[in-house]
Amino acid sequence: MAKFFINQAKQYAAARPNYPIQLFEFIASKTPCHDLAWDVGTGSGQASRSLAGIYKNVIATDTSSKQLEFAAKLSNVRYELTPPVMSLSEIEQLVAPESSVDLVTVAQALHWFDLPTFYSNVKHVLKKPDGVFAAWCYTNPEVNAAVDEVFRQFYKEKLGPYWDKARRLVEDGYKGIEFPFEKIMDESTESQTFPVRFVTEREMGIEEFLTYLRSSSAYQTAKDKGVELLTAEMEGEFVGSWKEDGEEKKVVRFPIYLLIGRVGGDRV
């Protein structure tokens, strides 16, 4: 993940949506204790800030020092710069001892991970049997018919060739990701679909929306290859569609898909 966002960490921190409190309340309701949470791939700390309001202590790790520079400094959040892959001894040294963590979270990053190794580490640190693992992604923004049509064209024709193959997992709402945990369904709905769906909203002007587009890994990959995807013509199409309804600020909606489950196993 770091190699995609290291060149635009400030944009990423400024443009990305926050997550709704309902998401964290739902997750926290599934952990019996609220002592320690580990936020993996914390980036600029969008998730760790919310976790810090619920859990006594939060360990927030990332492989990018640039991203961590923009994370909020909170008294009960410990930030750690970690290697992309850690051994169990490194996990215990940098993160937490075996069977000591109530919750492990990953926001918008699970698709980048070496899953077999990562899942082994998660199961090592989670309390047995009730420790919870939660990972979520948000998919493409929804604005209105005019803007969404321009975005669909831009996403398919411009960004499309530059996405990493892992992006397909996000497009599918994490339905295709291996998940070796005891699934927790949303019992408040009759359908009990999995992954569990939420929505986050952010008010944006056109410049903020364009900054969000520039913060994507596909845009950065193209830029590194000397290709500018947001040409003056393309920007003009976005600006024109944005102005159609006469509203300078718009509520942009991002669907969220949550994988959540218990580690299981014998109590330690």
Image (cartoon, helix red, strand yellow):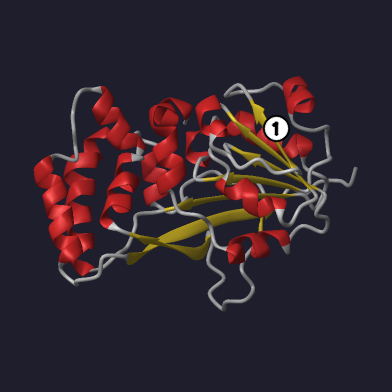
Q: Is residue 64 visible?
A: no
Q: Give how far across and how far down residue 42 sits, in percent.
A: 58, 39
Compare residues 77 and 162 and report the one nearer the observer.
77
> Measuring 30% from the left and 52% from the top, which residue is drawn there?
209
Which quadrant does the C terminus fall into? top right
Q: Give how far across and how far down residue 204 sits, in percent.
A: 35, 59
In terms of image quadrants, where is residue 238? bottom left
Q: Residue furthest right?
A: 268
Q: Give how far across and how far down residue 150 sits, in percent.
A: 17, 56
Query: What residue would you read off at disc 1?
Result: 121
Q: Is residue 59 visible?
A: yes
In terms of image quadrants, where is residue 168? top left
Q: Is residue 65 above or below residue 38?
A: above
Helix, strand or loop for disc 1: helix
Compare residues 78 and 198 and report the one nearer the observer.
78
Q: The disc labelled 1 sits on which kind of residue?
A: Asn
Q: Give how far across and how far down residue 106 sits, in percent.
A: 59, 44
| Left or right position of 232 against 39 | left
Compare residues 153 and 5 and report the one nearer the observer.
5
> Measuring 89% from the left and 47% from the top, which residue is drawn there?
267
| Left or right position of 137 against 183 | left
